[in-house]
Amino acid sequence: MLATQTRAETSRELANRLFQARRQSDALFSVVRNNFLYERPIPQRHRIVFYIGHLEAFDWNLLGDRVFGLKSAQPELDRLFAFGIDPVNGGLPADVPADWPSLDHVHRYVDRSRAALDEKLAGGDLACDSEACDGFSLRTLLNVAVEHRLMHLETLAYMLHQLPLDQKIPQADPPAPSASPLTDKVIHIPAGSVTLGLPRDSEAFGWDNEFAAQTVAVPEFEIDPYKVTNQQYLDFIKAGGYETRAFWSDEDWQWKTQQGISRPIFWRQEGERWFYRAMFAELPLPLDWPVYVSHAEAQAYARWAGKSLPTEAEWQRAAYGAHLEMDSKSDLNSRAGNFDFRRWSPVPVNAFPQDQSAFGAHGMVGNGWEWTSTLFDRFPGFEPFPFYRGYSADFFDGKHFVMKGGSARTAACMLRPSFRNWFQPHYQYVYAGFRCVSR
């Protein structure tokens, strides 16, 4: 988890990053067999076909009119793929495949939108630091376009994971690294301070919720050296963790009971045997992989273990200590970690012994996001992006929890220390694990 100073990228470099992200999203959609692109693998989400158009509609709505003054050829599709088809009465989506344009129509929309933008983007270096929209530079808007697409590459992986295996074209993972011996010795983190967020005068890109930087005092605590493993979580299940009321909050217990939740969503039980449903195959449960669970399930485990989930500040201090160059990003050349689309699946929690923080915590970046106990909220001095007001502010509702770190499907640029992810506590589909703390 080294940090390196980043220089400002030119508009041509940023455009090339966007073109590369497009190639990655095209490759991801090609994993799904064409007959199943109108499926809805997660009930709360849109059908897959929506996202094929959405990525282009977002770029068009952000750059086409605002920055380049281009006239849309299909404004009705710009709107459709910006928001989708609203559910009736706020319930789960109820649209049917016939409500959506044909795949050929969607692909024509994609091609036409890209071609119009590319004529501007590929025409030469633009004035990257000049004001482009609402007081923000073209550099900022291009970073928004790139990272928005890369975020969807990860959340789409969550969706495609839930498709039946025969609806996907299998992809191979590289060989897993050999794991070093595990230690159960907890790590003592002395009292100190930590910086959260980015300063306003930072040259580094950040989303609106990453501003403004603040220094937080953190009392001493102890933290697990690794993410909680499938083996450890299996011990919790065998000890009756899902049946013991005391480990669950009222809201979490009601959710678990009503939904019949009795195990992580990626697991399947057959008699006494447990299996893990990976993206392209089912395999015996890998006991040394990190467990992926909802916040509610992580919190119940922590109570069973007599511990807690870390706060955002505690996690940040254990990962980065007190001294951090805020105009920095994680070393993109580092091979010590499971991130940046290198693999589809997790690896053992101790697979990269060289990937440890200054305090000795292993694998805090990559191989699965890590839940914290901190509700997602604004930092002091927060100002929403005027061109994307709902990105963060819509989720300052006391119902979403901060996650830190990153997964195997997280882009390298979003491994920066200031980046914040968040989800509702009952959403099981995320590649998110956790580790516990004692105070």
Image (spheres, rainbow, N blue to C red):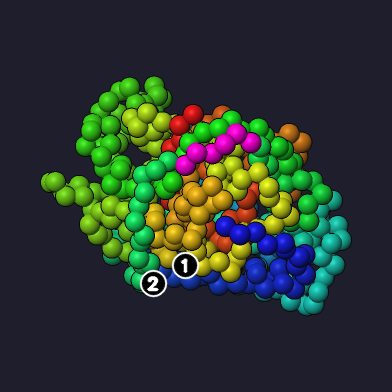
Where residue 416 appears, as percent x and y from the top left, is: 62, 54
Identify which residue is drawn at 80% across, 77% down: 124
Q: Nearer the viewer, residue 277 or 331?
A: 331
The amino acid sitting under disc 2 is: Pro
Residue type, numbered disc 1: Arg
Q: Does residue 318 show up magenta in the picture? A: no
Q: Quadrant of the N terminus?
A: bottom right
Q: Residue at x 46, y 52 (%)?
A: 362
Residue 19 sits in quarter:
bottom right
Instruction: Look at the numbered disc 1 and give the secondary structure of its residue.
Output: loop
Check disc 1 and report the residue beneath it: 342
Q: Residues within 10 Å of mark 2 (few under 14, many from 20)?
A: few
CB contact under 8 Å: marks 2 and 1 = yes
Question: Marks 2 and 1, Cα distance to the nearest angstrom?
Answer: 8 Å
Name the residue: 35% across, 52% down: 182
Q: Earlier in the sequence, mark 2 or mark 1?
A: 2
Q: Is residue 70 above or below residue 241?
A: below
Check the image and name the residue furthest to the left.
Answer: 271
Q: In terms of image quadrants, where is residue 282?
A: bottom left
Closer to us: 337 or 15: 337
| Residue denoted by label 2 | 174
Q: Is residue 203 above or below residue 438?
A: below
The residue lying furthest to the bottom in this view is 123
Asked whether residue 212 is in view, the answer is: yes
Q: Where does residue 404 sit, x and y in percent of width and height?
A: 54, 46
Residue bounds of the magenta highlight: 187-192
**Element marked by disc 2:** loop
Can you tell which quarter of the image residue 289 is in?
bottom left
Q: Is residue 49 left or right of residue 166?
A: right
